[in-house]
Image (cartoon, helix red, strand yellow):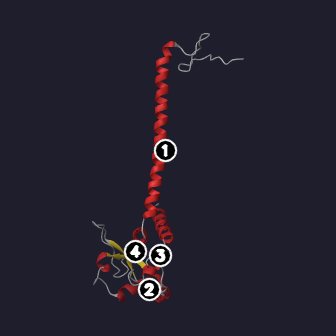
Amino acid sequence: MTFRRTRCPHCKAKLEAGQRIHPECIEPWADAQAAKAERAAKKKARAAAKVELAETRRRKEAMKRLPELIAEAQAAFNAFIRARDAGLPCICCGQPFEPMKPGGSVDAGHFRSRSSAGHLRFNEDNCFAQRKNCNRPGGTTYGAFRAGVVARIGEARVAALENDNAPHKWTREELIGIRDTYRAKLKEMKK
């Protein structure tokens, strides 16, 4: 038994015996088939471009050096700290933050500086929102900063920070994890 088409593939009307398509449907059907093939080709090209873009991102990520990863992790961490302390006053002077101005009005200030205690640069107990003028040289005293930190987290945790001098060498995986973790925390906080 042979298969015989009984309906036109274009207009779906019944066909006469021996017909495969109505003569008036040949051109529109061919155009529709060409358009369908074109859409499929575009879809395939978009998928290939998406794969290529993902591969390019992966290669760029693999080429990043430690200083770049530290900078990205620090930016994500600082953004989280500024968002975490958004409703609180400055840790040093106790004044409210100024309205946002170009360049921002809030810094993420480290109690123990990143240069002297680089191993604590991503420690949430060591970093707080600070007014820009308090975070600059000559802006505040160690005593005022320490008093603010003690009031915020307590004497025991401040003593633990001051006594923590264990050296730490950051790895790529740690830095990528820190960056991604703090980006996710910030995103969750903004929801």
> Between marks 4 and 1, how big is the CA–CA gap?
47 Å
Number of the label disc, if any, that sits on residue 88: 4
> Between marks 4 and 3, how big is the CA–CA gap?
31 Å
Residue at x 50%, y 26% (from the top left corner): 33
Q: Are marks 4 and 1 in contact (CB under 8 Å)?
A: no
> Where is residue 35 shown, x and y percent of the image?
46, 29
> Where is residue 181 shown, x and y percent of the image?
50, 67
Q: Are marks 3 and 2 in contact (CB under 8 Å)?
A: no
Label 1: which residue?
47
Tell me if I can see residue 95 in this picture.
yes
Instruction: Work out whether mark 4 precedes mark 1 in sequence or the reverse, and give the earlier one.
Output: 1
Label 3: element kind: loop
**Nearer the observer, disc 2 or disc 4?**
2
Relative to 125, does residue 46 appear above or below in the rendering? above
Q: Are marks 3 and 1 in contact (CB under 8 Å)?
A: no
Label 2: which residue?
150
